[in-house]
Amino acid sequence: KVEAAGFRLAEIVAEGEPEYRATDLPAGAERSRREFERRFIDAMPGQAERLRALIAEEKPDVIVAGSMVLGILPLLLAARPRPRIVVYNVSFLFHDRLDNAPLGFGLPPAHDTEVAARYGALKVGVDAAFTDPVRRYTDALLADEGLHGLPASLTQSIVMLPDEFVQATVPEFEFDYGSLPTNVHFVGALPVPAVAAILPEWWHRRDPSRRV
């Protein structure tokens, strides 16, 4: 598909490729955290190394990365020159909510202080079991490269650090985050690509007033 679109494919890594690997841990917060680390964070050093090599070879003007391609983080945190980095997000906005709801739970907005306090207590538990250990794990890998740690949680840093962060929706579809970083841009939905389908022989006889 990449080559058919007129591009050249340069595989990112062969070893340490992001994947879910079996774990003996029982279902729960610790297993979810470890799987997340293996799936996304363990691949970060290899991705960063490959990106640096591609930058040296191609000398690109800009890098456009998916929001969970964490190999861009070492580039963003390093002091050396680099191309501009744009992150395109394919999920909900990874930003802390004003009502203290923990990230990713999809909880409805808190309309009173009692619900906000309950959300805050829940977030403390999520931070202790997942958010804070994930940040420490990421910081340790960054330290191995001689880099400072993240400026905030991993998800917040993914939003804050890039030169531009593209969110493919409109603000009304997101939660209330208050004021957002100036690098965040809502761009609406991308156009749906045309799909060439083989139509059945009866297609021209269908009633065009009815939806298929």
Image (cartoon, helix red, strand yellow):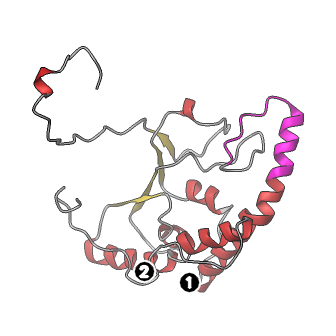
Rendered residue at 59%/36% (across/down): 174
Q: Residue at x 41, y 60 (%)?
A: 65
* Residue 39 drawn above or below residue 111: below
Residue 112 disc label: none
Residue that label 2 marks: 49
The image shows residue 208 at horizontal and vertical percentages of 20, 17
Q: Earlier in the sequence, mark 2 or mark 1?
A: 2
**Toward the viewer: 78 or 136?**
136
Residue 9 in percent (x, y) is at: 25, 69
- Residue bearing the label numbered 1: 145
Task: Kindly identify the residue that appears in the image at 81 percent across and 44 percent down.
Answer: 119
Residues in magenta, as a range: 105-122
At horizontal 54% and vertical 69% (from top left) the residue drawn is: 40
Q: Position of residue 176 (x, y in %)?
A: 66, 35
Q: Say which amino acid is labelled 1.
A: Glu
Q: Is residue 100 left or right of residue 63?
A: right
Binning the other alpha carbons within 10 Å of mark 2 as few (below 14), some (14 to 19) or many (20 upward) gives some
> Helix or strand or loop: what does disc 1 sit on?
loop
When the figure is inspected, residue 149 is found, relative to residue 183, above or below; the finding is below
Amino acid type for the residue under numbered disc 2 = Glu
Query: Which quadrant does the C terminus fall into?
Result: top left
Look at the picture and state if 70 lies above or below 105: below
Q: Check residue 114 for magenta coloring.
A: yes
- Residue 202, given in percent of the width and then of the height, sits at 12, 28
